Image (cartoon, coloured by chain):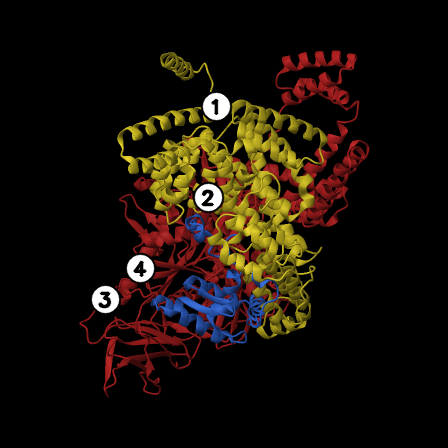
Amino acid sequence: MTTRPLYVGIDLGTTNSTVAVFDGEEVTLIRNNQGSVLTPSVVRIDARGNVIVGARARRFLDSDPANTRSEFKRLMGTTHALDFPASSTSRRPEELSAEVLKSLRQDVADQLGITPECAVVSVPALFELHQTAGASNAAHRAGFERVELIQEPVASAIAAGWSQSGSNGPWLVYDLGGGTFDVSLLETREGLLRVVGHDGDNFLGGRDFDRALMDVALAKLAADGIVIDRANSRHAQALRRLQVAAEDAKIELTRATQAPLFVAGLDVGGQVMDVDLTVTRSEYEAAIGPLIDRSLAICARLLAANGLGDGALERVVLVGGPTVTPLLRGRVRAVLGADFGEGLDPMTLVAQGAALFAGTVALDGRPVAKAPPSTGPKVWLQFPAMTSDLTPFVVGKLLEQTNTIKQVRIARSDGEWQSDPTPCEADGTFAVMVRLLPRQNSSFQVQGLDGSDSAVPLQPASFAITHGITLGDPPLSRSVGVALANNRVQVYFNRGSPLPIRRTFVLHTVETVHPGSEDHVLKVPIVQGEFAWAHLCRLVGTLEIPSTALTAPLPVGSEVELMLELDRGGQLRAQARIAGIDQIFDRVALLMTPQVSLETLADAQVKLRTRAADLSRAAFLDHSGKTAARLSAAMPRLDEVERNIVAARGGDLDAGEQARRALTDFDALLAEIEAEQAWPELGRKIEETFAMAVSWVAGYGNEAERSTLNNTYQACKRAFVARDSDEVERQLAVIQRLGEAAYLRHPAAWEWEFERCAARVGESTDLRRATELVAKGRDAVRQRDGETIERIVRELWGLAPVDHDEQKLGHGSGLRMR
Amino acid sequence: MTTHDPLAAWRSNPFFVLEVPTDATPTEVERAGQRLLALLALGSAGAGTYETPLGPATRDADRVRQALAALRDPQQRVLHELWANVAPADGPASGHSNAGPWEEAGHALGWSALWAR
Amino acid sequence: MGAVAGVIIVIFIVRMLSGSIKVPPIALAFGVKLAVFVFTITMVQATAPEVASAVLHVVVFVLIWVPIPLLQWIVVPLRMPRAAYWTVRIGWPLGLTKEIEASAVVYGALALARTSPSEAAISWLERKLRSSEPMQGAGVVAAGLLAALRKDIDQARGLLAIADRMHARLIPRSMRLIARDWLVVDAARVGNWHRVIRLGRHGMTRLRWSYSMARIGERLTGDPKAWRNWQLWPCFLWAPRRRVTYPLFRRALRVPVRQSVSPDAPPSITGLPLTLGGFARVLERANAHDGELLARSIDTVDHDLNSTHEMIEQRLGVLGGRGDAGSVLAQFRQRLIDLVTPLIEDDPYLARAAQPDSIMEQAVWQVRRRLLGDIDARCKDYRERTAGEDSLDLIAEWEAWARLTTSATRLLELDSAAENILFQMIYAPVCNFAVYQHNGRKRIALAHDMFVWLLAYAQGAPEARQLLAKNVQAGIAGI
C-alpha cells in the first residue's frame, strides 16, 4: 500500500461524515468500525470524560441529550461553547468537529494501515471566513498536518465529472445536506472544469424537512389536546424524542404512502403518555413543498444571474441525503428541465470528490518516508497529478551531476511511448511533453543521458499522472474587503477569485492619531459580503493598530499599505505597513464572531418591522407599487425570525444564528429600498438649494460668485447622475454656503438671523449667556447698530447645540481610499 | 512626475504572462500555465521574466495563477484578447522627441540621493 | 579712551544678555565677527612669518566673512553632514543668522545628498531640526530635503514649493535658491519641461539658474515664443553651473524655433491593434507630457473600439460565454480611464486638452473627485483640531499644510474653473486654523503662509479678501 499515493478526502457533514481515499486509479470509501461508510456527526462525553463519536453516540441523543451533541457544523467559528454537564466540561463546535475528524482519521488507519498526515476537508460553498477557519483549525486539532479546503459543490462536481463521460456545457450541482443548501453552476469544456457561480442558503437543509414533519405531528397532537411548546424548555426532551421518531418516519415515507410515528412514554411537562400518529405522504409533501420551492427559487436566481434560461442545463447532479425524497426529485426535474447524472451516490459524492481533489493538488497523506539509499542522481520533478490534457508538460531540475547529464528522456511504463532526448538548461532544468493514456493512470520512468550508450537512472525513477479533469484553483465564494470610514467597502478579493490570493492597497487615515493615547486604536475592519455598505457585510476580523505602538503622531491622510492574503486552507493573513513610521502591524483580532444576545435580536426585529412599515406607507403614498410589493413579499421573513428567536429561547442555538442571518439580510433589503427612495429625494434637495442660492446671489452676489454657483450646480448634477453621493454632498455644501454669503449681505439679514436665534434661545448650550446676548441684541436692533447685531448673532451661533451626526456604521474604520 | 510606470498593468495581461497567442485553445492555455508554475516552483531563472510587445516584465506564481483564472472566464478572456493584440512599436513616434527627460540632472548637481528609490 | 570704550562695551553686553536691549541677530553676528576678525588678524600678524601670514590672512577672512563658498565647494562634497552642520553653526554666515540652526540642517542634508545616506545621519539631522528655533523658510527647506532623503518625494515637493513662494522676509535668498533649484531638477529629470518653464519666473523672485533652465525648456518643447540662439547664449553664460548644464544647452540649441504651434499630423493608422500600439508608445515615452498627443491617441482608440462590437460577439459565442459585447466594451473603456488616471494625477496639466465626454475627461473627473475628497478630509481634520485646540509639532504642521496645498494646486492645474469651489471649501477651516496657530501657538510664519495662499485664491469673495488682507498685514508686522 505504501507504493500507491494516499489522497484523503473528508466530507464533514452536518448529520453524517464520510471519508474516502484515492490512490491515483480509483476511489475507495472507508468504513468505520461499525461497518458503515457514514459516520454520524454526533459527539458524546460521558461522566468519566470519555469521548464517543458516531453511531454509538447517536444512540444517546434522546436519552442523554445534555451530553450528546449533534449538528454543530453550522456553529463553527462562533464562540458558543456547548456544555457537557456530566463531565463538567464545555467544548466549542470546532473542538467537537475535531473529534469527528479524529475518529475518521483513525478509521483510515484501521482500514489501510497508514495514518494520513494530510487531507482535504469539504466546507459548504457559502461558508464565511470564520467558519472556514474553524473547519481548518478543527482538522489541525485532529492531527492533520496539512489541510486544504474544498467547497462541497466543487467536490461533487469533480466526482460527477470524473465518472461521467466528457460532455461540454453547463450543469448544476444541487446539494441539499442536513443543514445547508448549496447550488453551483459549473461548466465543462474540453475536460476543464470551471465554477461559474454559487448560490445557496446556509440555513436550509434536511433538518428543516424534519422540522416541517414535526410541525405536522405537533399540529395533530394539538388537535388531540396535547400541546407541546417549542419555547418551553421543559418540553425540550419530548421534542427531541419526537424528532428522532419523525426522522424515521421521514425515511419510511420515501417508500410508503404513510408512516407511523410512535413514541412510548413521552413526558410532556410532567404528563406521561404514548404518542401514536400516522403521517401520510401527502401531508408530508404539503409541509415540505414550500421548502423545496425555496430551493428552486435559489436555483432560478443563480441561472438568471448567469444569463441562462430554462432548459439550458445539460445535467443536474443531486447530492445529499434529503435528495432521495421523491417529491424533490420530481419537482427538480420538472422545473430545471434536465436529466440527473446516473450512478452517483448522493450520500458519498462529496467525500469522493474531496479525495479526487486531493489527488489534483497532490496532497499525499502518506507520512514522509525516509529517503532510500541513493541509486542515482537526484532530480526534482513537477507535474500535475491529474489533468485533462493528454499531453501535459513534466518539468524537472537535476540536483546533482548537472555537468555529466546533458539530456533527459521519459518513457511510459507500458513501453508504447517514449520522448525524444530533451536537453537540459544550464541550471539543470528541463521540460518534456509526455503522452498520457486516456482516462487512466499512466506511469513513467525518467532517465538521464550522459552521452554514452546506457541511460542513467535518476532518483526518483518513476512517477504517475492520471488523465481526468483539470480543475482550476478553488474560487472564493464571497468577496472580501476592508471597511472604510465612509461605510463603503474597498474590495480586495472579488467573489470567484482563485485561491490562494494576495492583494495590497494603499489606504489613508481619516484622522490624526497621537501616540500613547491609551484608548485610541486605529481600526482596520475586514469584512466579507457583496453589499456596497460596510455595515451590512459580515465583520470577519479587525487589524488593530494601537496608538501606544506609534513612535510619532500620525497625521491625517497618512498612507497605510495594507496587504490581505487568503490561502486554500481558509486562513486569512493581514499586514499593515505605515510608510512614514516604517512599522508593520499584523495582529488580526476577532476572527470569531461574538455571541449576539437574544434581546438584541428581538430589538432589532422590532425596529426593522417599524422601518419596513414606514417604507411601505411611503411607497403607497408615492404610488411605487413595485417597492410595496417587494416589501410585502419579504415580510414573512420577519415572522420566521420571530419563530427562530422563540426557538432560540428554548435552547436552539442554531435557530439563533439563523435569526441573526435573516435580520442582516432584511436590513440589507431595507437599506437598498431606502437608498432607492432617497435618491430622488436628494435630487429634489439639489434643486431647492440651488433655487434658493440663485435668488440670493442674483441680488447680492458678484459676477464671480454667480459663475461659481453655476459651475458648482453643473458639477453637482453630474455627480448626481453618476450616483456619487459624497461628491453631491460636497457640492451641495458649497452651493449652500454661496447662497448664505449672499443672503447675509441683505441689509436686514442680520436682524432676521437675530430673531431666529432669539426664538431658539432655549436650546443653547449656555442659557444664561444666551439670554444676556438676546437682551443686548434687542437693544442693538432698536438702535439699528448693524455691526453689534452681527457680532451678537455670531456669538449666538457659537452657543447653538452641535448636531452630532456621526454614525459609526463603518465598523469603526479609521481608513479611507484616496 | 514620479517614476510611476504607466504600462505596468498592461504588461501583466494574461496572454503576455502565459506567453500564449490570443487564439490558443483552453487546453494550450492550461498547459502553458502548468508548465510555468512548475518552472517557477523549481526556481528556474528564466521563468521569472518574460517579454511583451511593451517591454520586459516579471512574473511570479501568483500572477500566473491569476492569469489562468482570468482566461477561464469567457468574458474576461475576450477583454484580455483585445488588450493583448498590440502592434509592436516601429517607426519614429510623433511629438517632441527633443523634450525628453534630462536623466542625469540629479547626479550632475550632486543631489542623486534626493531622488533615490 | 580705551578703558571708557571697554566699559561701555561690557555694560552693553551685560544689558543685552539680560534681555533689556534687543539686537537684531544679523547686527550681533556682524559685531562678533568683526571683533573676532580683528583679534585673529592681530594675533597672526604678531606671531606668524610673512608668507604664512598672508595665507592665514586669507584663510581667516574666508572663515569669518564668507563661509558659504567654503561649505559648497569643500565641506559638502566631503559628504560629512555633521561637519557641514557645525561649520554653519560656528561660521555663522550673515545671510542665515535668523535661522542659523535650520540652515545648518539644510547644509547637512546637502552633504548627504550625494550617496545613499545612513539612517543614523538622517535621524541626527531630524533631531537637530526639531530642536531648532525659530523655524521659518530655512526650516521648511530642511524638512523638505530630509523628506527627500527619506524617499518621500511628494512630501518634499510640497514643502519645497511652499519655501519657493514664501515671503522674502521669511526665507533667506540662499535657501529659496536651494528650494527652487531642487524643484527644477525634479521636473527636468522626468522631462516635465512645462513645469520647469513655470518655475523659472520673471520679476523680483527671479533666480538665475532656474530662469535659464526655463528658457532652455521653452526651446526644447518647441514653444514659438522661445528665445533664439543669440539670446540664449548670454542667458546661459550668466547663469551658474554652466559646465553641468552644457549638454542640455547644446540639445536645446539644436532644436529649431517653430513659427507657430502647428498640431502634429493626426496619425494615419487605423485598426485597433495599431492604435493601441500608438497609444502604448505615447504612454511610455516622455512625450506623455504633451497632453494633446495623449488625448488624441486615446480618442483614436476609443473610436476604433466602436467597430469591434460584432467581432466581440463572435468571440464570445465561440468561447461559449453568455456575456454581452456591451459590457466587454464598457470594461475596456474603464481600463483606458484607469490607465490614464495616474498620469493625470501626477501631472494635471496633461488634462487641459481633454474634450467633453471623452475618455480623458472621465479620467479627469475621477482624479478631480479623489482630490476633492482628499482636500475635504484634510479640511475636516483642521476643523476638528481647531475646535479641540490640538496642534502637532511645527514640522508636522508644515508637512500637513504642504500636503493640502499640493492637492489644491493639483486640482487647480487640472481645472482652473474649480478655483472658487476650492476656495469655498477650504476658506473657513484653514483661516480659523491659521488664526489659532497665530494667536494660540505663536507660529507666525505658518499662519502668514496660510493667509497669503488663501488670499491668492479669494478673487470671488470680497469679504473674505478683506479679512485675509488684514491678517496678512498683521502677520508681516509680526515677523
Question: For mark 1, does the 10 Å Cα neighbourhood hold few (<14), some (14 to 19), or many (20 or more) residues?
Answer: few
In the rendered image, which quarter contains the N terminus of chain C?
top left
Of circles 4 and 2, the one toward us is: 4
Q: Which chain is red?
A: A
Q: Amino acid at mark 1?
A: Pro
Q: Which residue is mark 3?
A: A369
Label 3 marks a residue whose chain is A
Q: Which residue is mark 1?
A: C24
The mark that comes first in sequence, 3 or 2, is 3
Of circles 3 and 2, the one toward us is: 3
Asked if residue A327 is positioned above or below residue A586 in the image, the reply reads below
Q: Position of residue C287 (x, y in %)?
A: 58, 60
Question: For mark 4, does the 10 Å Cα neighbourhood hold few (<14), some (14 to 19), or many (20 or more) residues?
Answer: many
Circles 3 and 1 on the same subunit = no
Q: Which chain is blue?
A: B
Question: For mark 2, does the 10 Å Cα neighbourhood hold few (<14), some (14 to 19), or many (20 or more) residues?
Answer: some
Q: Can I make out residue A509 in this image? A: no
Which of these two is toward me, A486 or A664?
A486
Q: Which residue is mark 4?
A: A105
